[in-house]
Amino acid sequence: MPTRKTALVTGSTSGIGLGIAEALAKEGHNVVLNGFGEAAAIEALRARLAGHGADIRYDAADMADPAAIAAMMERSLAAFGAIDILVNNAGIQHVAAVDEFPPEKWDAIIAINLSSAFHTTRLALPAMKRKGWGRVVNIASAHGLVASPFKSAYVAAKHGVAGFTKSVALEVAQHGITVNAICPGYVLTPLVERQIPDQARTRGVSEEQVIQKVMLAGQPTKRFIGIDEVAALAIFLASDGAKSITGAMMSIDGGWTAQ
Ligand code: NAD
């Protein structure tokens, strides 16, 4: 394999996805960015990453829409020949009791957090198989391993990602392709910041109590995980040194799921 590979990171205009995309660009890889945001801000991100020297593109495909995902994959494969490193990261959250959970939110979470990974992966694998090298890194969650109340759709989707990861890892194990999931605990990103007022309302407590008594209560290190830490793990999983790690749920949760 040449040193320069091509990566596609879904949901990479913000948070963890952006951190991983930037780390991949710093490693010299071409990157297809994806996600929502204001056009000028996204172009500024794209230009910043391109400053590391590789070909950085942006694709606006909506991860809730299988046809849009297929079109993004077709464009990316036409441009680069293969997506060597696929990072399925796009995700949303909604916090509500299950008997009050809006059905349209359930459908959106399953589509974006789970089904999008199926659509990107199924379309990326043929070129990876032809090259005999590939990396699929699924950003699951500690909620892919354990549950919390009021997050039924998210926990179901992330447990689904765990199952999908293991099953596909077995299918492609002899093709030089690894498929793993990263399972972070709480990382302070816009997704988590948005949950704080929702959780405060649902639980009837203050926002500071949500941070200390809900979010960090189960995280023994008592601090948020850094985006840079998750990105470093993704870079390792994408490396040749990680070629025998496959079908793994890689916890990076400050000890949360050790309890
Ligand atoms: P974030 O809100 O900062 O970023 C989410 C990204 O996904 C954004 O770029 C957004 O534009 C994009 N996105 C959302 N809906 C989309 C759609 N329909 N189509 C395309 N892009 C879409 O969130 P984050 O915290 O960085 O989360 C990234 C991933 O990490 C998610 O899968 C999340 O579940 C997971 N995760 C986050 C944490 C945490 O504590 N932040 C912990 C564990 C797992």
Image (cartoon, rainbow, N blue to C red):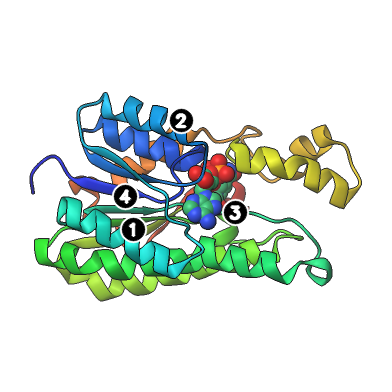
Give residue 126's mark.
none
Query: Could you tell me how far apart the alpha carbons at marks 3 and 1 are, in whole angstroms?
Result: 20 Å
Name the residue nearer the viewer: 125 or 148. 125
Q: Is residue 205 above or below residue 64?
A: above
Precedes in sequence: disc 4 or disc 2: 4
Q: Is residue 226 above or below residue 90?
A: above
Q: Which residue is mark 1?
A: 72
Precedes in sequence: disc 3 or disc 4: 4
Q: Amino acid at mark 3?
A: Ile
Residue 203, given in percent of the width and then of the height, sits at 87, 50
**Which residue of the protein is positioned furthest toward the right in this rendering?**
204
Precedes in sequence: disc 2 or disc 1: 2
Name the residue nearer the viewer: 21 or 205. 21
Q: Left of 150 or right of it: where is 182? A: left
Query: Could you tell me how far apart the alpha carbons at marks 3 and 4 are, in whole angstroms?
Result: 18 Å
Query: Could you tell me how far apart the alpha carbons at marks 2 and 3 are, in whole angstroms?
Result: 23 Å
Q: Amino acid at mark 2?
A: Ala
Q: Is mark 4 within 8 Å of ligand 1?
A: no
Query: Could you tell me how far apart the alpha carbons at marks 2 and 1 are, in whole angstroms?
Result: 20 Å
Crowd rating for badge 2 (residues with CA inside 10 Å; few <14, some 14–19, many 20+): few
Q: Which residue is mark 4?
A: 8
In front: label 2 or label 1: 2
Q: Which residue is mark 2?
A: 40
Q: Left of 134 or right of it: where is 195? A: right
Residue 102 in view here? yes
In front: label 4 or label 1: 1
Q: Which residue is mark 3?
A: 92
Secondary structure of residue under mark 3: loop
Precedes in sequence: disc 4 or disc 1: 4
Precedes in sequence: disc 2 or disc 3: 2
